Image (spheres, rainbow, N blue to C red):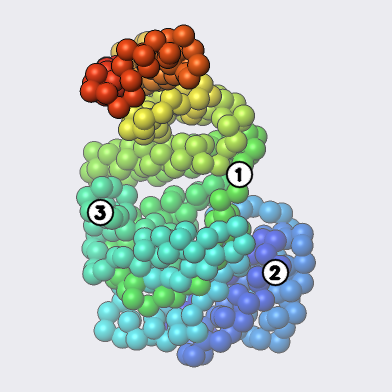
Amino acid sequence: MVAVPLLSFVVIAYNVQPYIIQCLQSVKAQTLDDFEVIVVDDASTDGTLECITREVADDQRFHIIAKSQNEGAHLARRTGALATKGQYVYFVDGDDSISALLCEQVSMLTRASSPDIIRFGLDAFPEIGADDGTATAVEAVFNNAQGMRTSREIIETAFSDIISPRDVWSVTVCAYRGDSIRESFSKMTSKRLGYMEDTYEFFVIANESQTLQNYADFHALKYRIGAGRSGRRLYSAEEFSKRQREVHEMYLLLCEYCNSQRDDTDFYSRTSLWMKRQYLLMLVTDWVTRLPAADQDKGYTAIVETWGAADAAIMLFDPLIARGESLLSKNSIPPGNDEFYRWGQILAKIVPMVDDGRNLPRYDQYRQLEQALEHHVAEIQLKEQQALQAEQERIEAQARFKKGTLMRRVIDKVMPAGSLNRDLVSVIRSHAQRAKRER
C-alpha cells in the first residue's frame, strides 16, 4: 500500500521560465521530507516544461502533468488538486516560491487538530516596475488575520464587511485538508476562468469547509509583486474589455453555485450581491489606474454592454465623486480635460439608459457636487480677474506718477516727498488697493 504523504504541493506553471527553477528548488528544500509534488504545465511555449523536466528528473516525489492546450490557472489547479493524495494540499504559482519550513509547520499545526484550512502569511518582493511601498502594503493585508474561523464565519470574514480589514481570499496562502479540497474542486466549474479566478475558487472552498486556522505569523509564501498577473502595467482597451468579460462570466458561475445551495438562500443572495459590488469596484479601479485616458471611453462602453447601464453607472460614482471632492479642496481651476469632466461625459451617456438617473443611488450627490464645483471655479475666476485688474491699475498708477511726468511734477510741487500730506496720501492709496484685492 502506497503511503499517503503529509503534504501535496500543486505547482501550476505557464510561461514562467525565468522563475520555475527557483520555485521547484524551494519545494525540494523542505526540511521535512513527507510530501509529493504535482507540477501542472499549462501548455507553456517558452521552455518552462523543459526546465521542469530537467529539474525534477529522477526525483520520485515529483509528478508532471503536461497539458497539450492552455486552459488557464483555474483548470490547472483543478487538474492538480484532483491528482493529489496528500493529507493536506498547498498550491504554488510557478513564478513564486515557498519557505523551506512549510511542510514542517503543517506537520506541527496538525498534530492536535485537523483544520480544513490553514492560512499563512507571506513575504512580498517587488519585481522591476513595482515598488517597495506596494510590497509593504500587500504584506500588511495578507499578514493581518488571527484566530480561528468556523463554519459560515469563513465566508463572512472574507466575503462581507462584517470585519475590517477583511480576511484575504487568496488560494495560494493556505494549506487545505486533502479530502476537503479535492471535494471542493470536484464541485467547481470545469470551464476556463480568467481574471481573479481565485475569488470564485476560495468562495467554494470556504463554503465547503468547517474550520479555518489563521497562522499568519509564519510566512509560507515568497510572493513576487510584478511577476505574472500581479503587476500594474497599463491595459489596452481590448485587453480591459476581455478581462471585465471574464470577471462577469466568473460572477455568473458564482451565482450559479450560490443558487445550488438549498439552505439559507437569503445568505447566499446577499453574499453574491456583495461579491458583485466587489467585482465592479475592482474593475473600476483597474479602469481608472490601468487604462490610458484615450481608451477609457471605449473601456467603459464594454462595461455597459457586459454588466448593464445601471451597474456601470453606479460603479462610476466612486471615482467621479472622489475626484470632484479633491478638486473642491484645491484653490485652482482644473483643466478642461480633467478626469472629473471626462468621466462626467461618460456618465452623461449612460444616465439616459437608466430612467434619467432618478433610480440611481448617489446621482443627486454627483449633481450637487458638479454644481458646487462650478461655483467654486467661478469664485476662483472672479478672484483672479480682480487680482489682474488691481495689478493693471497699480501699473497704470505707477506710470502716471513716474518721475518726469506732468502729474508727478505737480504732486512734488504741492506735496513734497517726506511731507505729512504726501505720506497720508500714500497710506490712503495703500489701504484702498488692499480693500479692492480682498473684495
Q: Is residue 274 left or right of residue 336?
A: left
Q: Residue 333 in the image: x percent, y percent?
A: 43, 25
Of residues 35 and 360, the one drawn nearer to the viewer in this rendering? 360
Q: Quadrant of the C terminus?
A: top left
Q: Quadrant of residue 314?
A: top left
N-term-proximal mark, 1 vs 3: 3
**Residue pointed to by mark 2:** 18
Residue at point 56%, 47% (across, down): 194
Q: Residue 130 in the image: x percent, y percent?
A: 55, 59
Q: Say if 417 sits above or below 242 in the image.
A: above
Three-letter amino acid code of the residue under disc 3 = Ser
Q: Is residue 93 left or right of residue 167?
A: right
Q: Residue 186 in the image: x percent, y percent?
A: 47, 57
**Residue pointed to by mark 3:** 164
- Camera sees residue 12: no
N-term-proximal mark, 1 vs 2: 2
Classify mark 1: residues with Cα within 10 Å, few (<14), some (14-19) or many (20+).
some
- Camera sees residue 71: yes
Residue at point 41%, 60% (across, down): 137
Q: CA distance from mark 3 to mark 2?
A: 37 Å
Three-letter amino acid code of the residue under disc 1 = Leu
Q: Quadrant of residue 348?
A: top left
Q: Is residue 187 left or right of residue 259?
A: right
Of residues 16 and 347, the one drawn nearer to the viewer in this rendering? 347
Question: Which mark is nearer the camera, 1 or 3?
Answer: 1
Is disc 3 placed on a helix, strand or loop? loop
